[in-house]
Amino acid sequence: MANPSNKNVTMKSEARRERKMATASVVASLMAVLSSSSSASAFAPSSSSLRTTTSAIDVSSTKLFHWANRFDVRFEEQSSDDESPLLQETAAKHKLQPISEEFTRRSILSIGVIGTTLSTLLSSSLPANADFAPGGTLLDRPVYVTYGNSEASPTRAPNNSNVLFAQDNYYKFGSAAQWIEAGSTEFPKTMPFVPSQQRYDALKKFNGRVQTSKDQIVKIGSVSSGADVPDSDDPAYQLRALGLLANSFLASENTGTTNELMLARWYINEMYLRIGDYRGALQKGDQKDAEACYGYLTKAMNSYLTLINRSISSKVGDQFSYL
């Protein structure tokens, strides 16, 4: 009969070997890339416009191992929750059968996430402050929750673990989104095509809940005590309904999850965070900070409504008013 302790030792040895192979896979893949692409997009500020002067580092094998380890840390933060969408989706796609939790992470690292990492291609150098977005994209700039918008909530967790919708603009681009002026069509430049019937049905279903959400935010704006502000996850705010409406307005079976949908989720997540920030400021008696937080809360709501209104034509229904 096999000794259980020997079996455990063998499994641990296999896990260590797989970890080394996973890291080597990342390094080999990064070294094989010969071209580059910018990390800037319409949904993330360009690194050159915001980044202070930094020194570049040579992409030697030692440095690439460093970035592979940086990615490993980011990935462990993301997959620390057993319900992580990234963990579940990748494991299901590749039908992984891990021998341990640690082995699971390294397997996904070598099989599933490497494709996301290589979406930002490397050339002959990496900025010294390059980092990974929570979703796994390697960017040629720093990644932090207020990058690109200093008015974004600073209480967002770096790994996006304390928001309603984990896969949002920050998750993908590692930056905060810009606000949208009420009624503006300047940003984003285009909107995804979604059948009008799908939008009509969604508006009919969620219109009342969106109005309830707006009314609740207006209501808390006149209170003077934090005790009068319900917690961010209180159903009175109907924030999940805002996400469901965005799902039907900004994505379809043909488009999948679009950048515009991730943008809408970022605004909803900012509302969620700013409600908590506002409540906390009132509890501390900091009226100035409370007013600032409430102002950012309304900016997030109006940005969301502007994005949604662009998909409401006369055939779909009436557009929402702003706060």
Image (cartoon, rainbow, N blue to C red):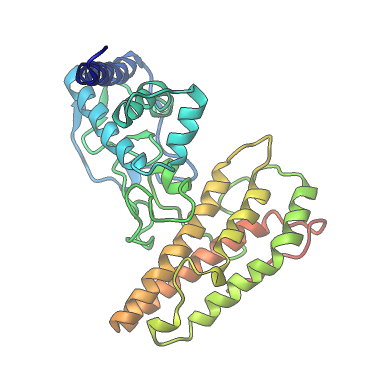
Splitting the image into 4 quarters, where does residue 46 fall?
top left
Is residue 189 rendered to the left or right of residue 26? right
Farthest right residue? 315
Q: Quadrant of the N terminus?
A: top left
Decide if residue 181 is in sight here: no
Q: Is 235 drawn above or below residue 200 in the view shown?
A: below
* Farthest front residue in view: 1
In the image, residue 79 above or below residue 23 = below
Please say if 65 is above or below 232: above
Look at 46% across and 64% down and name the residue there: 272
Q: Is residue 107 left or right of residue 187?
A: left
Residue 21 image point, x, y percent: 28, 16
Q: Quadrant of residue 242?
A: bottom right
Front one among 55 and 146: 146
Q: Residue at x 40, y 32 (%)?
A: 38
Residue 165, percent from left and from top: 49, 51
Q: Quadrant of the C terminus?
A: bottom right
40 relative to 268, above or below: above
Seen from the viewer's position, the closer of residues 5 and 119 is 5
Q: Residue at x 36, y 16 (%)?
A: 33
Residue at left offset 50%, top offset 58%: 267
Res. 312 in view: yes
